[in-house]
Amino acid sequence: MAAIGTLPNGDVVVVGGAVGPVQVANEMLTGASDTDVLVAAIEVDGRVRWARLFGGLGYDVAEGLAIAADGTIYITGQFFDRADLGDGNVAQGNGGNEAFVASFTSAGAFRWAIHFGGNDLSTAYDTDMGTSVAIAPDGDLVIGGSVSRVVDFGDGMQTPASGAQNDGFVARYSPDGKTLRWVRRWGVTGENVVAGVALDASGQIYVSGSYAGSPDFGSGAVPARGGNVDAFMLGLTSNAGHRWDKTWGGPDTQRLYGLTVLGNLVMSAGYYWNVIDLPVAASFGRSDGIIVAYTTAGVFDHALRFGGANCEFARNITGSTAEVVVSGAFSDTVDFGDGPHASRGGTDAFMVGLDQTGVVWSDTFGSVSDDKSTGMTGSRSSGLYVVGHRNLAFDANCNEHAHSAYITRF
């Protein structure tokens, strides 16, 4: 599972991918082949209200989720070549990976879907995907992700590829997905990905992710730091105008994932290897988790890091102005600032509660196998839902492989 959100009636929706056939409650869902998109609604008591499994013959998965105030569900992700996006019809791509956006009612009924991807298969890379979706105050959809080739995002115009392995992008669509308002795309070399998108109450847009080299986010080329990938945060107007950008890096790898706007703060969670040019110390081990906060005007507020001797990263961030909750994964032993926690197996999931003074509480959970959190919704007072993966295996670069899924209510 990749993401989770709350419906107005208190049910939660989870999205991700599954290899069918897969049993959800008393229903056996059969997919097309390989990995298919899974969307399911879970009641407060853990019973499955409804579930959908759809896709094609390749790797098809949902990565991002947003739920409107009326319960309308929006998801984004990727599919390979051609796939059923939920309506029973086959969406034909360009022969490689395609990004998609789809919408469903709160009862799981299909509403609409769009998809886009490149048409130049000569490149060795094929990474067109949507990773995040957010809803603007006027109902428009803001999508983030990455693309690797010449792409028509829906207006008939071909946006050129930069020559990088893949480019990061942000695009804005009408509520029905039929009209592309605008698209921003950047990249120079290597890997460029948008991992988080959020909006404030006035409709200003904030973006987080990773980049390589010296792309131009709108204020000129940013510094190249010589590492694999570096982290960024970007502020845009509702019409894609550049407001500010912030970048951080070091000699290795830095990434930001989840993003949220809480009052006048924009906060993102991720990880870094060894050192990063923020006011935090060098990592304890291989990778440390990090939380970065800027004001909505782009002024640095604070950064917090935690780690142990192995792989740690923060993946999700949610909450309110009173309390922020962050989740992710750690290996061996970690100290969030309130004392050490030891994993039950190789890697365990964690949650950390923060206020303006720092760490208020922390909790870890897992099994003798490897576990991590990939998404959160809710609060400690009303019920905090965490979704993630079990049976992970981390390689020497802290990349994960082989997993099953879980959802837990705290």
Image (tube, rainbow, N blue to C red):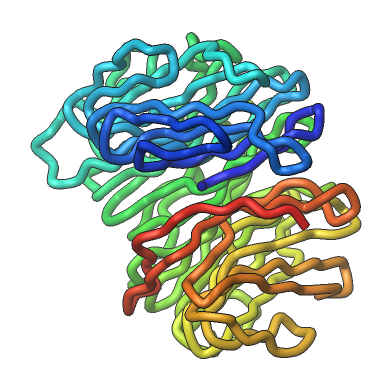
Q: Where's residue 335, x and y in %?
A: 68, 86
Q: Nearer the viewer, residue 123 or 54?
A: 54
Q: Where's residue 45, x and y in %?
A: 77, 42
Quarter of the figure that contains the C terminus: bottom right
**Residue 266 in sight here:** no
Q: Is residue 76 left or right of residue 50?
A: left
Q: Where's residue 94, x and y in %?
A: 20, 24
The residue located at (35%, 60%) in the rendering is: 402
Q: Nearer the viewer, residue 362 or 159?
A: 362
Q: Where's residue 286, x and y in %?
A: 45, 84
Q: Is residue 136 left or right of residue 2?
A: right
The residue located at (79%, 85%) in the rendering is: 338
The residue located at (86%, 66%) in the rendering is: 355
In the rendered image of this protein, does residue 306 appear above or below residue 365? below
The residue located at (79%, 59%) in the rendering is: 324
Q: Nearer the viewer, residue 21 or 192?
A: 21
**Residue 2 in sight here:** yes
Q: Is residue 297 left or right of residue 114?
A: right
In the rendered image of this protein, does residue 57 appear above or below residue 335? above
